[in-house]
């Protein structure tokens, strides 16, 4: 689980400058999704060996009619409710303002870890340092004189931020070790060892499903419909951590935990009026889920925000079920549904593998199908392809669709191995890993999908023979 770190502060203090500076340490994206990666408010970055998601809450500034104070207060509330640590940016040249003080007192009460960035201190000069000192009066502890523009002081500030994050859990440490070992094996060109975790252990893990979507698409209604008959009491679930927004249920003897991101919004008193808030809630819920169920409103489909949420699921590599809800308001005509499906598939091309289901959470129509798909996809998400079958597939590909010529000669794929799950990750050892054309990558991915019936994201790594 990557911790979320929020950047808050009033306008013009340098939040986006800092955000862009921090983004230089970002973890490479698998693929840029046009339209989704534009105007980003979050990046996954690595500092001090720790992966975290930074969020520029300035990108979520509410309506212009709101007063400045109200805007900053909402950002701070969002940060406090959803994030694990907060970077409170101030303008040390302008000095301490009453808006800063107001926000600081709110942050203080929250008990969340906070660092104060006294920004725009571009030189080491005495008087500027004295400006920074003033911000100790906020009573938030650590104050870091920084220059977001020139990168001064940012490193040591981030060191402190990482130090304040909750430590990695034993499971996370174990997962890291495993990933590093798999990576090493793959580098040596070996296949996933047979000594891997026994299958039944994975079977027993509950399936975590995040219900995401814009406000009012019907998330809570869907969750309630699903829980109506199948809810189990907490004590029946061994070894699961409880969160008030999580609900447990059983489906065909499988343990399922639903995280209702609308619940996050309701539980807290403030009204998240903004659709953009659903992005932060989704980011957080997806971090610990196997499957994301993305709800959209049939009467108002595939707007930018829906695409953005689908893009996050793809980027985070989570299995995805697309749910077109409120279908009762549209039609019972089967043809209409097919047209709708085609249009939606086109708008959300980058998650073309995700199944689409038309529901009415209100009447209960097709809601069970959502659960059925979620469980199915969760299994595909953790699927391990048998190595002999992978070899057969590679042979079949070589015979029917030889690799293209790249540069001076033909691309040669020597072998293919599955090096990870959740999402399924395959390594291909070849002679020119950098020269594999995108078309061919897509072809290989599709072959893997077809052969193993994988309707989840797939990651492909291309490596040179060691
Ligand atoms: P935001 O509204 O809080 O996101 O602020 P911006 O990042 O847009 O920055 C507001 C202005 O402050 C811009 O003109 C930046 O160039 C400037 N700025 C940001 N960081 C620094 C800094 O470290 N030093 C100086 N001198 N100016 C900065
Ligand atoms: P959330 O904000 O995504 O959790 O949305 P809610 O579950 O609160 O639903 C918002 C509104 O849409 C409520 O008035 C629901 O009764 C209504 N609604 C939810 N699902 C359906 C549906 O399938 N059909 C119709 N007609 N209305 C629905």
Image (cartoon, helix red, strand yellow):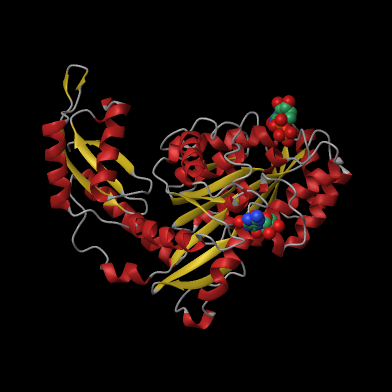
Residue 458 x, y percent position in the rendering? 34, 45
Residue 122 visible (yes or no): no
**Rendering coords of residue 466 (x, y %):** 17, 38
Q: Nearer the viewer, residue 445 or 154?
A: 445
Which residue: 80% across, 49% down? 73
Q: Residue at x 57, y 53 (%)?
A: 212
Q: Is residue 295 left or right of residue 30?
A: right
Position of residue 202 relative to residue 274, above or below, is below
Q: Residue furthest top?
A: 408
User: Residue 331: percent from the left, percent from the top?
Assistant: 57, 47
Residue 411 visible in the picture: yes
Quadrant field for ligand 2: bottom right
Is residue 63 left or right of 155 when viewed as pictured?
Answer: right
Q: Please determine whether, in this image, residue 227 is positioned above or below residue 188.
A: below
Residue 445 % position (x, y): 29, 39
Q: What is the residue that sits farthest to the front in this orientation?
A: 333
């Amino acid at each position: 689980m990557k911790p979320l770190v929020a950047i808050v502060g009033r306008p013009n203090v340098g939040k986006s400058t800092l955000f862009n500076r921090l983004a230089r340490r970002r973890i490479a994206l698998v693929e840029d999704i046009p339209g989704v990666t534009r105007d980003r408010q979050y990046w996954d970055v690595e500092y001090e060996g720790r992966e975290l998601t930074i969020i520029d809450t300035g990108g979520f500034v509410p309506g212009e009619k709101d007063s400045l104070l109200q805007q900053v207060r909402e950002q701070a509330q969002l940060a406090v409710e959803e994030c694990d640590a907060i970077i409170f940016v101030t303008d040390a040249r302008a000095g301490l303002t009453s808006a800063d003080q107001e926000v600081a007192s709110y942050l203080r009460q929250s008990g969340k870890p906070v660092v104060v960035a006294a920004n725009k201190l571009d030189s080491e000069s005495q008087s500027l340092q004295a400006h920074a000192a003033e911000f100790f009066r906020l009573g938030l502890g650590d104050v870091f004189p920084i220059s977001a523009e020139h990168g001064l002081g940012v490193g040591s500030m981030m060191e402190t931020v990482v130090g304040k994050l909750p430590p990695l859990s034993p499971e996370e440490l174990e997962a890291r070790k495993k990933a590093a070992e798999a990576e090493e094996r793959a580098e040596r060109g070996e296949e996933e060892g047979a000594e891997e975790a026994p299958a039944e252990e994975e079977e027993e893990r509950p399936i975590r499903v995040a219900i995401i979507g814009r406000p009012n698409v019907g998330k809570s209604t869907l969750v309630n419909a699903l829980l109506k008959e199948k809810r189990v009491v907490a004590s029946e679930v061994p070894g699961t951590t409880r969160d008030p927004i999580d609900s447990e249920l059983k489906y065909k003897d499988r343990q399922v935990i639903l995280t209702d991101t609308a619940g996050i919004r309701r539980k807290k008193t403030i009204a998240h009026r903004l659709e953009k808030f659903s992005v932060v809630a989704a980011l957080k819920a997806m971090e610990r889920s196997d499957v994301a169920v993305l709800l959209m409103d049939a009467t108002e489909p595939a707007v930018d925000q829906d695409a953005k949420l689908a893009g996050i699921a793809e980027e985070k590599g989570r299995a995805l079920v697309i749910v077109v809800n409120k279908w009762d308001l549209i039609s019972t005509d089967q043809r209409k549904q097919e047209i709708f499906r085609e249009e939606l598939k086109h708008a959300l091309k980058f998650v073309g593998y995700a199944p689409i289901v038309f529901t009415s959470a209100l009447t209960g129509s097709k809601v069970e199908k959502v659960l059925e798909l979620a469980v199915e996809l969760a299994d595909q998400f953790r699927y391990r392809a048998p190595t002999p079958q992978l070899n057969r597939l590679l042979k079949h590909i070589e015979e029917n669709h030889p690799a293209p010529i790249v540069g001076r000669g033909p691309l040669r794929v020597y072998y293919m191995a599955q090096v990870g799950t959740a999402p399924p990750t395959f390594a291909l050892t070849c002679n020119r890993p950098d020269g594999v054309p995108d078309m061919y990558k897509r072809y290989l991915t599709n072959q893997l999908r077809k052969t193993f019936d994988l309707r989840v994201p797939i990651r492909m790594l291309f490596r040179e023979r060691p």
